[in-house]
Image (cartoon, helix red, strand yellow):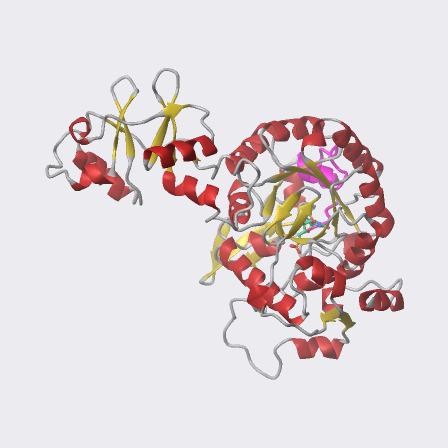
């Protein structure tokens, strides 16, 4: 109600993150007792409410793997051809399903010394190597125990390995592998093709972690594969089909103006046909009617953000956009409660996340903050002794020149002459921030404290009862460190 009051009093004035602050409320629990689980879309959950942006300097397979392992989800960008895009999705889906697709193996004629040298050189942290014969058929496994009791490293592997081993057929599922390994008390289970060659390897350590939930933060589908989303343009049905065949969990129709015929028709067609097996997310919108139109068309989540992004120039170049807190609030009130809102763009500090949630978002999509990390595809550069990462808007001239997917986001897919492009974004660099894990650790931890301050134990509870106050320019000045010369960046507070 308080948020409704604030929004009514500022009708037709857009508010954004720095215009509001959250107000404390009574809590009878500690921050560590809170849960930050949330929803990405109708059927896809999140263990942390963070999504990586569909941008070519943010989300390729490495970022999608990293963020799903941390409990969020990545949207693989579409500025590449369809085959590569599908490959990228496969990489994520096959990353941690417990099956090592291409295990390190050795020939039985090699010596123990050769194996140990290779293990040292590549710093392989594990033992348990499949050993193959001259015809490529699996002949045994060299286990840690075999190595322990080997007193002559010149011996051939065939004389040291365990040769009576249990194997299973190619295609054995994680659950079946788990049962076999528990039953027979074995640590490694090689899978064989029909001709006896190696098709993969299950390692009990990984399989056990997945099945028993030791890796419980990871965002996994029902087959214990990492969740992954990918972007398409309106009417991009060929791409959608390839992504679905590759195992994608959600298709994101990624445009700068989602309240448009092309996006609505694409949602309807996907949901009526090939997209019915996956979640379809559409955007971006910045209004209640826009969000409602996409939800009515069948979207499983609506992405909100017209111009809040750190690299966006839409508001300046076109004079169009809605400040993000108001946009999220309006959109979230216009869609059914089972259609989550993704607040896309403009997150500068971790404190922006609970503000987005209080306005009605179920997750936040981040570009610049994740572009800055090790797992982003953005080029890492050194300048004056500091590391930076190249980050560019998908509507920047550089991104639009390098791919059609990016031009299509800004309805300029047919423009071939680059001098005729109208950019709506910029290219620049962001200071390097380490791994996605270290950034999201700060964000997830801060969000748990926000929940504690606001007396809300969960994300839906914060959406329900969070209170926002309007902040004046002096309130904002007071919020930031003041009357001090900062000499050191904190891990979660920087001036740039
Ligand atoms: P942040 O603030 O997280 O924003 O860096 C990322 C989001 O910005 C959007 N985006 C753009 N918007 N011109 C725009 O107007 C662009 O060139 C551009 N590129 C990305 C997008 O929604 C992304 O998730």
Q: Is residue 154 magenta?
A: no
- Where 64 falls versus 487 (above or below)? above
Residues rendered magenta in the picture: 404-425
**Can the viewer see residue 5 in this picture?**
yes
Q: Residue at x 34, y 18 (%)?
A: 196
- The percent coordinates of residue 49 (x first, y second) are 63, 54
Asked whether, in this view, residue 186 is left or right of residue 253, the answer is left
Q: Residue at x 62, y 81 (%)?
A: 482
- The percent coordinates of residue 115 (x first, y second) are 22, 35
Asked whether, in this view, residue 239 is left or right of residue 59, the answer is right
- Where 118 falls versus 192 (above or below)? below
Give 148 or 301, whichever is nearer the viewer. Answer: 148
**Can the viewer see residue 396 in this picture?**
no
- The percent coordinates of residue 295 (x first, y second) are 81, 42
Give 127 or 232, whichever is nearer the viewer. Answer: 127
| Farthest front residue in view | 183
Q: In which image quadrant can residue 1 be found?
A: bottom right
Q: Residue at x 81, y 52 (%)?
A: 331
């Amino acid at each position: 109600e308080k948020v409704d009051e604030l929004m009514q009093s500022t009708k037709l004035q857009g508010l954004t993150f720095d215009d509001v602050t959250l107000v404390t409320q009574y809590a009878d629990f500690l921050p560590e007792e809170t849960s930050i689980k949330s929803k990405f879309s109708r059927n896809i959950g999140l263990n942390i409410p963070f999504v990586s942006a569909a941008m070519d300097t943010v989300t390729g397979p490495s970022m999608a793997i990293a963020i799903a392992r941390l409990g969020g989800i990545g949207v693989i960008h579409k500025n590449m051809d369809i085959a590569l895009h599908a490959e990228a999705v496969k990489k994520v889906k096959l990353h941690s399903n417990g099956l090592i697709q291409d295990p390190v193996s050795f020939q039985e004629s090699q010596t123990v010394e050769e194996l140990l040298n290779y293990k040292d050189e590549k710093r392989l942290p594990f033992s348990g190597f499949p050993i193959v014969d001259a015809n490529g058929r699996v002949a045994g496994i060299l286990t840690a125990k075999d190595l322990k009791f080997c007193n002559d490293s010149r011996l051939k592997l065939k004389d040291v390995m365990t040769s009576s081993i249990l194997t299973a057929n190619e295609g054995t599922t994680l659950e079946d592998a788990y049962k076999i390994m528990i039953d027979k008390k074995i640590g490694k289970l090689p899978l064989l093709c029909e001709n006896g060659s190696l098709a993969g390897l299950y390692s009990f350590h990984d399989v056990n972690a997945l099945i028993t939930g030791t890796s419980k933060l990871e965002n996994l589908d029902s087959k214990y594969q990492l969740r992954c989303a990918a972007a398409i343009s309106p009417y991009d049905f060929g791409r959608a089909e390839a992504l679905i065949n590759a195992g994608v969990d959600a298709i994101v129709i990624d445009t700068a103006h989602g309240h448009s015929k092309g996006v609505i028709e694409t949602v309807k067609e996907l949901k009526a046909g090939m997209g019915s097996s996956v979640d379809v997310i559409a955007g971006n919108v910045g209004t209640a009617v826009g969000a409602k139109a996409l939800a009515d068309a069948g979207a499983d989540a609506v992405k909100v953000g017209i111009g809040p992004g750190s690299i966006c120039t839409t508001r300046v170049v076109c004079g169009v956009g809605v400040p993000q807190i108001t946009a999220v609030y309006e959109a979230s009130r216009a869609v059914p409660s089972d259609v989550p809102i993704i607040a896309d763009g403009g997150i500068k500090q971790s404190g922006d996340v609970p503000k987005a949630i209080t306005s009605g978002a179920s997750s936040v999509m981040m570009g610049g903050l994740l572009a800055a990390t090790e797992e982003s595809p953005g080029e890492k550069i050194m300048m004056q002794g500091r590391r930076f990462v190249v980050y560019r808007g998908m509507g920047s001239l550089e991104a639009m020149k390098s791919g059609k997917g990016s031009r299509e986001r800004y309805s300029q897919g047919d423009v071939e002459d680059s001098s005729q492009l109208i950019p709506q974004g910029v290219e620049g660099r962001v200071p390097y921030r380490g791994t996605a894990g270290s950034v999201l650790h700060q964000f997830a931890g801060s969000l748990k404290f926000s929940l504690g301050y606001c007396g809300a134990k969960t994300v839906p509870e914060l959406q329900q009862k969070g209170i926002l106050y309007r902040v004046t320019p002096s309130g904002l000045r007071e919020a930031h460190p003041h009357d001090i010369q900062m000499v050191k960046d904190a891990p979660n507070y920087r001036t740039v």
